[in-house]
Amino acid sequence: MIAIDKSNGSYQLASEPPIAELLRPCKDCIGLNCKACRGTGRCLISMDSADVFIIAKGPEDKPISIGIELASIEDLISKLHTKRFQGFQHPNMVDAYDVCYLLSYGRIRSKGTGIEYSIVPGKWKQFDAGGYSYTYKALVKILAGPALIDRFNYYNVESYQDAALWIRAVYDTWNKKWSSHESFCVTYQAPVTEARSSKGFSSLTPLIDLTTKRRNFLYHLASIPGVDFEIAYALSSVFNTTYDICRCDASQLSKIPLRERHGKRRMTIGPERAKSILYFLKGH
C-alpha cells in the first residue's frame, strides 16, 4: 500500500506514471477543481508528517511503515536553515514511521564560499538566506545529522520525475518477501564471529535470541568510540533508538546499570562515559 499527501509539492506525484498506477482512482473526481484528488484522478490523503506513506514488508514479512519526505533542493536548504526540518519534521517522522527517508530533487554544487542550486531544467542560482551563505561542507554536515542520530536516510535525485522513479523503486524493494533479499539479509543476520570477540560479542547472551531490530541497534551502539558490547547491551535495554538516548542528559545516562559478570559488583555507565556517548551522538 502507498499513499500520497495532498499538500503542494507532493500531490503532483500522483500524476507521475510510476506512482499513479499504484494509487486507487478517485471515484468522485470532478476534474481540476476536485478537492479529493486535486485534479490528479487518484485518491490522496492528508498527513501530519511525510509526503509519502508506504506499508511494506519487514523481517519475517511483518508489516512496517515507511515515511518519505520530498522537497526541492531549494526548499530543503530553506527548511534546514530555519530549523523547521530538525525541530518539527524529523522528530515527527521518527515517532510515526519505522523507516524514514528524506528525498530532495535538484542539483547542488559548491561555488566560491557558498553553494548554488538548480531545479532541472532551470539555471543555477546562488543560495542566500537573508545574507547568510552556507558552505558546501556545512550543508553536508547538516544533512548527515539525522542519519547519525536516528534511522533517517537522505538521498538526492536530479528531477521531480526521477524522484517518482526513486519512490517506486523503494516501494518495490520493500514489498518483496524478506527472504528474497539475499545480499541485504546478510546484514540483518550477521553471525557472532571471533572478529567481534574483542568487544565481547561472543561472551554474552547469543545475539540470535534478540530481535533483529535490537540486534542491529546493538551493532550500531557498539560502533561508538569507547562503547563495548556490555555498555551497548545496557543502553539497548533502556532505549529503542539513538534519538531516545540524545533526549536524556549525561546524569540520567550515567546511572544506567551494567550487568553483573562473574560475580563482580554491578557497575553503571558512569558520568565520563555518558558525556562521551552524548558528545559523539549529538556531534558537539
Image: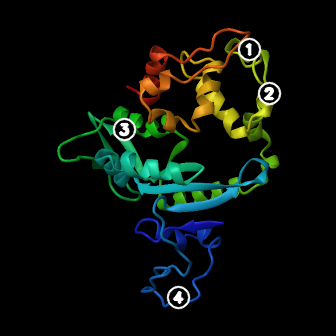
Residue at 72% from the left image edge and 50% from the top image edge: 58
Q: Nearer the viewer, mark 4 or mark 2?
A: 2
Residue 165 tag number: none
Give whichever of discs 4 and 2 has the lower sequence position. 4
Q: Is residue 278 left or right of residue 79?
A: right
Q: Is residue 274 above or below residue 154?
A: above
For the image, the number of numbered tags is: 4
Alpha carbon of mark 2 to alpha carbon of mark 1: how far? 12 Å
- Mark 1, Cα crowd under 10 Å, few <14 / some 14-19 / many 20+, is few
- Residue beneath label 2, please? 191
Residue at 58% from the left image edge and 28% from the top image edge: 235
| Pointer 4 with pointer 1, Cβ within 8 A | no
Give whichever of discs 3 and 4 has the lower sequence position. 4
| Pointer 3 with pointer 4, Cβ within 8 A | no
Residue 29 tag number: 4
Amino acid under disc 4: Cys
Q: Is residue 119 left or right of residue 153?
A: left
Q: Nearer the viewer, mark 2 or mark 3?
A: 2
Q: Position of residue 16 (x, y in %)?
A: 55, 69
Residue 197 tag number: 1
Amino acid under disc 2: Pro
Alpha carbon of mark 2 to alpha carbon of mark 3: how far? 37 Å
